[in-house]
C-alpha cells in the first residue's frame, strides 16, 4: 500500500510525464464512483480507511452529501507505488446523472484514461453508454470495474458460474460499445478483457476488489467471496471485513491505472489530432507531442470556479510548456491577454499553491480575464490554434423564469447568475426583451433545481416559474420564390434575401464546433467545401449563430463592407426570435442575394440596416411552411417483467414511442423516445407504478417536428405565455413591394 505523500513529493513526480496517469472515473448515476474514490484516497493517506465509503470525500458540497449524488467534477492527485516505482495519479471523479453530463465532457478533455464503473446487477445503463461514448470521442482509453458484486450474492443469490456468466454479459456489452465508438486504430486493442487484468470487480461499499492477477496472487476464488456473504448475519460482517483486508479494493484499481492506462507521453501523440487542429510541426505542436515542459505553453481549460478570494480559478490540462506565476499568456478563442497571478494544484476542495505545473499534468491558475470553459491558454506572442470545441451530448432544453423576490437584490442576482453561468456553461441565462423576464435554461428539472439551491446558498431568494420547454423553429422546405426584398425604415436602402434548409451534416458540424463564428474565414470555407457547399457560398459564410448560417452572395455593390456588421446583427435578431413563436431558429441558411445602399453613411446606420435584414428573413420563413420543433429525449428503463405493462401505459400516456424491448432473464429493458414536454414528474409516477423496482434514465436525443395536429395549439400557448397575439403573423406583414 502507498504511504501518505506530502505535496513536495507530488511536485517532484510532476516533472516525469512517463509516470503520470491522468484518469477519470465515469459511470451511470448511483453505480458507486464516489464510494470507490474514497477507498483510493484512503490508500494514499488522504482520508482514513475507516471512513472510506461513507465519507464521500470528493462529494464536498453539502447537497451532494445529502442527496448521495455527485454534481461537480472533483480533482485530486495521489501517489501509488507499483512494482517499486512511484506513480502520480491525477484523478477526476465525475457526476453520473445525465443533467450533469456536461461536467463529464469537460473532465474527459483533461485525461487520457477512464475507469468505467458498472453496477453488477443493473449492468451498463443509458448513461454508461453516454459517458463511454464521450470518453472514446476524446480518445480516452477505458478500463472496467464491476461494482456491487455483493448484490449478486445477497439479492439474486447467484452461483460462482452464474456470476461469471453475468460478468461475461457486462463485458460483451461494454466491448460492443468500445467497438462502436473507439477510434479505428484502437477498436481492438482497447477491448477490456478479464485475462489481461483490465477488468476488476468488487464492492466499493465493503472495500474489497480483485482482478484476475490479484485473484491468483491472493488465492481468492468466487466461492470464497460467496462464503464471505453467507451464513450467520452476525458473522457476515466479520468475514467481509477479512475479505477487504485480504483483497483491499485500491490495490487492483491503482495497479490497473499504472499498468494499463497511458502516460501523457504515450497518449498526447494520438490524442493531438483529435482535440487540437493546429500545425503538428509548429513549436507548440512538437511540444505537445513530446510533452515538453520547456516548449511554448498550451493549456485547455476544463473547469472554472469563481472564488470570492482568488477570483476566477481555471483548472485544466497542460499539454505543452508549463504554467508559472507571472507568465504572460493569450486566451486564443476570446482574443484577450493576461498574466497568470497564481498557480495551484487541486486537492478536492483545497488548492495548494505551487510555483510551476509542467506539461502532462492538470493544474489551476487564477488572474486571467474573460475566461470560459474550453478556452485555450497559450504563450503570449506566438501564433497558435485553439483546441477543438467540447461536444456536449445534450442541449439545455428546460427553462424557468427566474427573478429575485426583492428588487433590492438585483445587483446580487446579477453577480450570482454570472458566477453560476461561468462555472457551468450548460446553464443559459438570458433576458427576454419583450416580456422583461429573466429566463434560465438547463439540461433538465434536476439541473435547475440544483441551480436554485445554489442561488439560495449564496443568500439570494428567488421566485421560479414552473418548467417551460424550449422549442425551435425551422422550415419544411427551401424558399421557392424570387428573392425577398427588405427596405430600411427610411426607404433609402434595399436588401434581397433567400432562405434554405441546412443539411444535417452542416448542423452537426456547427453543434460540434467544427464550424464557428470565431474561426478564420479560410478554415470555415474549407470545412463547408468538404461538406458539399459551392465554393462561392462556402467563401461567403459570414456569420454562424445558434445552428444557422448567414451567406453573403452580393457581388459588385458599394458600401457592403461598411454595413455588413449591422446586417449580421439583424440576422442574429431574426434567428434568436423567429416569427412563429419567438423561439430560436434551427438549421437555416440565409442568403444575401443583392443590396442597394444610400451613398450617405447617415442614411445607412444600424437603425436602418437591422430592420431591413430581419423583416425579409421573417417573410421568407413564413413563406417556407414554418414548423415548430420540440426536444425529444431517449428513455431507457430496466424493469421486472411483471411491471412492463405499467411502463408501457405510462409511455403511451406521455406520447412515448417504444423502439425496442430486449429481455434478459426476468428483466426487460424498455427503450423509447418521448417529448421533453411530457417528461415532467415522470420519476414519481415510475416509482409508484413499479413499486420502486425500475432502473431508468433519460437523455436528450434530437429535435423533431411537433405533430401536425398539435402545431397550432402549441404555438398559441407559447405566444400567449409571451404576451403575444395568439396567431402568428402573416408573411404580408413583412413583405415590401418595389
Image (tube, helix red, strand yellow):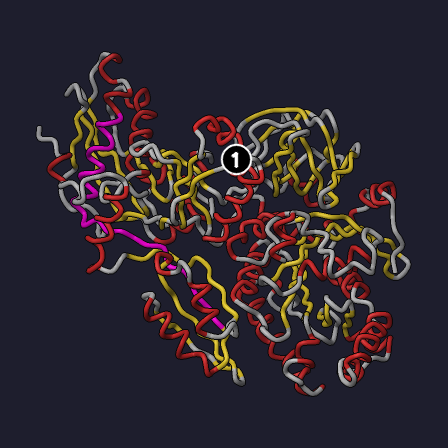
Left or right side of 544 for 318: right
470 shown above or below 731: below
Mark 1 secondary-structure assignment = loop
Q: Who's the residue at 64% across and 63% down the image?
A: 116
Q: Nearer the viewer, residue 434 or 325?
A: 434
Percent coordinates x, y for residue 128 in the rendering: 57, 64
Rendering coords of residue 425 (x, y %): 51, 42
Q: Residue at x 37, y 44 (%)?
A: 547
Residue furthest to the left in view is 738
Residue at the disc numbered 1: 460
User: From the viewer's perspective, is residue 217 above or below residue 341?
Assistant: below
**Residue 378 shows in this picture:** yes
The image quarter containing residue 708 is bottom left
Instruction: Give the x, y percent position of residue 600.
Output: 23, 12
**The magenta stretch spans which residues?**
610-637
Q: Is residue 105 above or below residue 127?
A: above
Q: How many marks?
A: 1
Amino acid at each position: 500500500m502507498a504511504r501518505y505523500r506530502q505535496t513536495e513529493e507530488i511536485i517532484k513526480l510532476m516533472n516525469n510525464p512517463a509516470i503520470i496517469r491522468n484518469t477519470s472515473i465515469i459511470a451511470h448515476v448511483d453505480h458507486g464512483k464516489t464510494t470507490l474514490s474514497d477507498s483510493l484516497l484512503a490508500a494514499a493517506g488522504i482520508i482514513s480507511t475507516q471512513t472510506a465509503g461513507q465519507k464521500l470525500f470528493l462529494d464536498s458540497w453539502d447537497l451532494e452529501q445529502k442527496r448521495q449524488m455527485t454534481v461537480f467534477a472533483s480533482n485530486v492527485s495521489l501517489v501509488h507505488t507499483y512494482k517499486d516505482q512511484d506513480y502520480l495519479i491525477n484523478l477526476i471523479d465525475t457526476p453520473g446523472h445525465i443533467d450533469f453530463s456536461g461536467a463529464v465532457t469537460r473532465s474527459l478533455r483533461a485525461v487520457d484514461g477512464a475507469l468505467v464503473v458498472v453496477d453488477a446487477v443493473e449492468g451498463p445503463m443509458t448513461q454508461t453508454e453516454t459517458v463511454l461514448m464521450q470518453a472514446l470521442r476524446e480518445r480516452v482509453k477505458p478500463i472496467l470495474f464491476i461494482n456491487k458484486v455483493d448484490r449478486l450474492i445477497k439479492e439474486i443469490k447467484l452461483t460462482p458460474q452464474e456470476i461469471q456468466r453475468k460478468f461475461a454479459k457486462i463485458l460483451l456489452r461494454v466491448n460492443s460499445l468500445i467497438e462502436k465508438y473507439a477510434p479505428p486504430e484502437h477498436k481492438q486493442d482497447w477491448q477490456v478483457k478479464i485475462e489481461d487484468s483490465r477488468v476488476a470487480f468488487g464492492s466499493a461499499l465493503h472495500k474489497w476488489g480483485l482482478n484476475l492477477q490479484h485473484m491468483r496472487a491472493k488465492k481468492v476464488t468466487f466461492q470464497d467471496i460467496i462464503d464471505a456473504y453467507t451464513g450467520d448475519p452476525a458473522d457476515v460482517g466479520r468475514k467481509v471485513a477479512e475479505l477487504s483486508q485480504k483483497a483491499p479494493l485500491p490495490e487492483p484499481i491503482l495497479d490497473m491505472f499504472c499498468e494499463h492506462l497511458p502516460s501523457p507521453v504515450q497518449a498526447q501523440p494520438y490524442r493531438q489530432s483529435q482535440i487540437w487542429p493546429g500545425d503538428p510541426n509548429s513549436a507548440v505542436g512538437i511540444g505537445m507531442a513530446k510533452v515538453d515542459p520547456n516548449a511554448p505553453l498550451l493549456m485547455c481549460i476544463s473547469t472554472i470556479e469563481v472564488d470570492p478570494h482568488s477570483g476566477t480559478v481555471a483548472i485544466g490540462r497542460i499539454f505543452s510548456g508549463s504554467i508559472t506565476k507571472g507568465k504572460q499568456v493569450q486566451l486564443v478563442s476570446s482574443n484577450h491577454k493576461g498574466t497568470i497571478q497564481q498557480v495551484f494544484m487541486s486537492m478536492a476542495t483545497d488548492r495548494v499553491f505551487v510555483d510551476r505545473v509542467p506539461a502532462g499534468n492538470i493544474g489551476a491558475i487564477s488572474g486571467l480575464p474573460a475566461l470560459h470553459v474550453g478556452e485555450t491558454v497559450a504563450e503570449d506572442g506566438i501564433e497558435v490554434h485553439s483546441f477543438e470545441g467540447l461536444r456536449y451530448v445534450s442541449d439545455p432544453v428546460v427553462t424557468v423564469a427566474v427573478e429575485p423576490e426583492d428588487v433590492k437584490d438585483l445587483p446580487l442576482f446579477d453577480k450570482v447568475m454570472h458566477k453560476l453561468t461561468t462555472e457551468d456553461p450548460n446553464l443559459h441565462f438570458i433576458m427576454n426583451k419583450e416580456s422583461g423576464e429573466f429566463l434560465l435554461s438547463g439540461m433538465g428539472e434536476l439541473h435547475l433545481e440544483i441551480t436554485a439551491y445554489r442561488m439560495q446558498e449564496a443568500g439570494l431568494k428567488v421566485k421560479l416559474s414552473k418548467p417551460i420547454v424550449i422549442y425551435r423553429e425551422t422550415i419544411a422546405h427551401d424558399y421557392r420564390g424570387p428573392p425577398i426584398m427588405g427596405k430600411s425604415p427610411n426607404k433609402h436602402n434595399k436588401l434581397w434575401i433567400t432562405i434554405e434548409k441546412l443539411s444535417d451534416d452542416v448542423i452537426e458540424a456547427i453543434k460540434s464546433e467544427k464550424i464557428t463564428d470565431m474561426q478564420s474565414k479560410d478554415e470555415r470555407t474549407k470545412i463547408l467545401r468538404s461538406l458539399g457547399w459551392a465554393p462561392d457560398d462556402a467563401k461567403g459564410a459570414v456569420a454562424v449563430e445558434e445552428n444557422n448560417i448567414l451567406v453573403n452572395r452580393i457581388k459588385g455593390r458599394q458600401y457592403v463592407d461598411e454595413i455588413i456588421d449591422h446586417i449580421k446583427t439583424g440576422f442574429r435578431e431574426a434567428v434568436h426570435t423567429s416569427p412563429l413563436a419567438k423561439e430560436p431558429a434551427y438549421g437555416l441558411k440565409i442568403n444575401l442575394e443583392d443590396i442597394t445602399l444610400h451613398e450617405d453613411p447617415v442614411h445607412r446606420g444600424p437603425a436602418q440596416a437591422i430592420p431591413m435584414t430581419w423583416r425579409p428573413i421573417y417573410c421568407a420563413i413564413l413563406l417556407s411552411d414554418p414548423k415548430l420543433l420540440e426536444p425529444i429525449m431517449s428513455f431507457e428503463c430496466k424493469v421486472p417483467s411483471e411491471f412492463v405493462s405499467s411502463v408501457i401505459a405510462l409511455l403511451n400516456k406521455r406520447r412515448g414511442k417504444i423502439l425496442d424491448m430486449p429481455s434478459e432473464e426476468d428483466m426487460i429493458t424498455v427503450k423509447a423516445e418521448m417529448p421533453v414536454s411530457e417528461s415532467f414528474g415522470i420519476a414519481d409516477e415510475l416509482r409508484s407504478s413499479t413499486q420502486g423496482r425500475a432502473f431508468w434514465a433519460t437523455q436528450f436525443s434530437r429535435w423533431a417536428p411537433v405533430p401536425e395536429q398539435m402545431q397550432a395549439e402549441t404555438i398559441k400557448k407559447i405566444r400567449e405565455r409571451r404576451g403575444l397575439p395568439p396567431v402568428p403573423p402573416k408573411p404580408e406583414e413583412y413583405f415590401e413591394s418595389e
